[in-house]
């Protein structure tokens, strides 16, 4: 019992390499396993692994993935299996404890990938493709909102269908899950893996965001989209289930998307939730897929997209506006089109800067008016802002000219002088 089959090459096995992707900094290979015509299963293997191992119908099978597998590798595997088998006594049937121990020991070999329960339809069911046309039509409208004009798009596809060498950023995956991506420059910078759990009505999700794109609201956007799209992908779905190891994701589901935890715990704040998860407790959060929650998800989605677009493409700061009355540099030969009409009045300044100039004190005959020729003519050229005289401390002074007619004695002695009296304004 539990026989060990010889190593076979990849082309002689039921496995086919169908894609190579990058999950963050790790290169992964996606293999398709076809035990029958109507059944395909997808297996993710880290690039560089030399051999696959799996247990089927009471036998251990091994497939060489490269041409240069060391001959001793299979020999060492046989020794490990036979050593563990001798520690167990059994007569018939499977010994699950022994199988688990063999698998644990074999997984310590970095060149060997062990597939557990490859024949188990609950753990590794045959892949069933979903009709994605309706959900993808919705995403066409979503892309107009989310930022296709600034280089961001959302798409929905199976992991194994992504373009070769495409970079995704996702948690643990098998290769057959649906992946909802926010893409930037041909990189899935934020993702949610989703699948309908076998025998249930639960859409199970897990999310991951590339580090430099965190805190932009992308995780929240994707979780909203899962609630909006789930019914069009999985018609029998009734819940979205998030196995939350990240307190941020759990808080989004509870605080914004009407989710409820699987524990009788009242999380009044993010701190309560954070301490609960960090203490090692398992937490699952469900959101019912119904009309009120879908409407709420759309509302949260619209607000989050607006906030995210602002973070990704902030408005440019306004440039300083020019002074309303700029003082031009005087030109030695101003042209008629640019020269300004000179003004005899001083320019208006602010009340803090402005001081009323003193009235000039004049001398000469009392009634002799100034001739027009004696008045100072303004020079042609641009107006120049006169310097305001320094303010003089004390109350404002008004100068009033008062003239007296000369007496006869004064007339005889020689012309009289105009006398100026300063009258203070109280």
Image (cartoon, grey):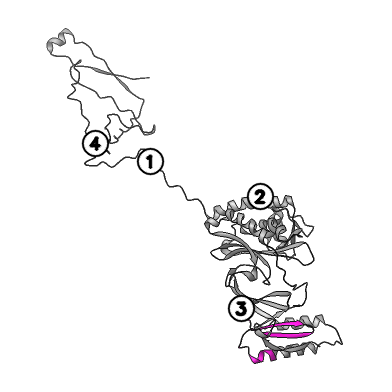
Q: Which residues are magenta?
A: 47-75
| Disc 3 from disc 1: Cα separation | 65 Å
Give residue 323's mark: 1
| Residue ranking furthest to the right | 91
CB within 8 Å, label 4 to label 2: no
| Disc 3 from disc 2: Cα separation | 42 Å
Could you tell me residue 214's position as x and y percent? 59, 61
| Disc 4 from disc 3: Cα separation | 82 Å
Residue marked by disc 4: 381
Would residue 221 be visible to someone looking at this image?
Answer: no
Residue marked by disc 2: 299
User: Which quadrant of the structure image shows residue 207?
Assistant: bottom right
* Label whose residue precedes the other's in the sequence (4 or 2): 2
| Disc 1 from disc 2: Cα separation | 44 Å
* Label whose residue precedes the other's in the sequence (3 or 1): 3
Q: Is residue 347 left or right of residue 416?
A: right
Q: Is residue 57 magenta?
A: yes
As helix, strand or loop, the secondary structure at mark 1 comes to loop
């Amino acid at each position: 019992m539990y026989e060990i089959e010889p190593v076979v090459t990849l082309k002689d096995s039921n496995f086919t390499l169908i894609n190579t992707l990058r999950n963050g900094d790790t290169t992964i290979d996606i293999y398709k396993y076809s035990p029958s015509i109507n059944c395909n299963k997808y297996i993710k293997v880290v690039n560089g692994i030399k051999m696959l191992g799996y247990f089927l119908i009471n036998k251990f099978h091994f497939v060489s993935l490269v041409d240069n597998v060391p001959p001793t590798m299979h020999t060492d595997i046989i020794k490990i299996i036979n050593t563990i088998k001798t520690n167990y006594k059994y007569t018939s049937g499977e010994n699950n404890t022994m199988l688990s121990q063999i698998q644990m020991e074999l997984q310590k070999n970095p060149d060997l990938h062990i597939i557990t329960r490859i024949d188990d339809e609950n753990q590794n069911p045959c892949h069933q493709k979903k009709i994605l046309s309706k959900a993808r039509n919705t995403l066409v409208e979503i892309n107009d909102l989310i930022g296709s004009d600034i280089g961001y798009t959302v798409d929905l596809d199976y992991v194994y269908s992504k373009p070769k060498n495409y970079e995704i950023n996702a948690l643990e995956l098998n290769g057959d899950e649906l992946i909802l991506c926010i893409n930037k420059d041909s990189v899935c910078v934020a993702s949610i893996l989703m699948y309908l759990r076998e025998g249930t009505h639960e859409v199970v999700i897990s999310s991951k965001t590339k580090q430099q794109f965190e805190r932009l609201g992308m995780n929240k956007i994707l979780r909203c989209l899962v609630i909006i799209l789930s019914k069009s992908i999985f018609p029998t779905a009734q819940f979205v289930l998030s196995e939350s190891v990240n307190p941020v994701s759990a808080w989004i589901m509870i605080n914004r998307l009407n989710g409820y935890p699987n524990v009788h715990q009242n999380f009044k704040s993010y701190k309560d939730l954070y301490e609960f998860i960090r203490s090692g407790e398992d937490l699952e959060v469900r959101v019912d897929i119904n009309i009120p929650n879908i409407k709420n998800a759309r509302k949260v989605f619209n607000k989050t997209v607006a906030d995210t677009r602002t973070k990704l493409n902030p408005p440019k700061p306004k440039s300083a506006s020019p002074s309303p009355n700029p003082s031009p540099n005087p030109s030695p030969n101003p042209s008629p089109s640019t020269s300004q009409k000179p003004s005899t009045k001083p320019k208006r300044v602010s009340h803090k800067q402005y001081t009323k100039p003193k009235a000039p004190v004049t001398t000469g005959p009392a009634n002799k008016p100034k001739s027009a020729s004696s008045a100072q003519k303004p020079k042609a050229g641009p107006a120049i802002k006169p310097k305001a005289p320094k303010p003089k401390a004390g109350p404002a002074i008004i100068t009033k000219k008062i003239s007296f007619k000369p007496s006869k004695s004064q007339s005889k002695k020689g012309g009289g002088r105009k006398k100026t009296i300063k009258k203070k304004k109280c």
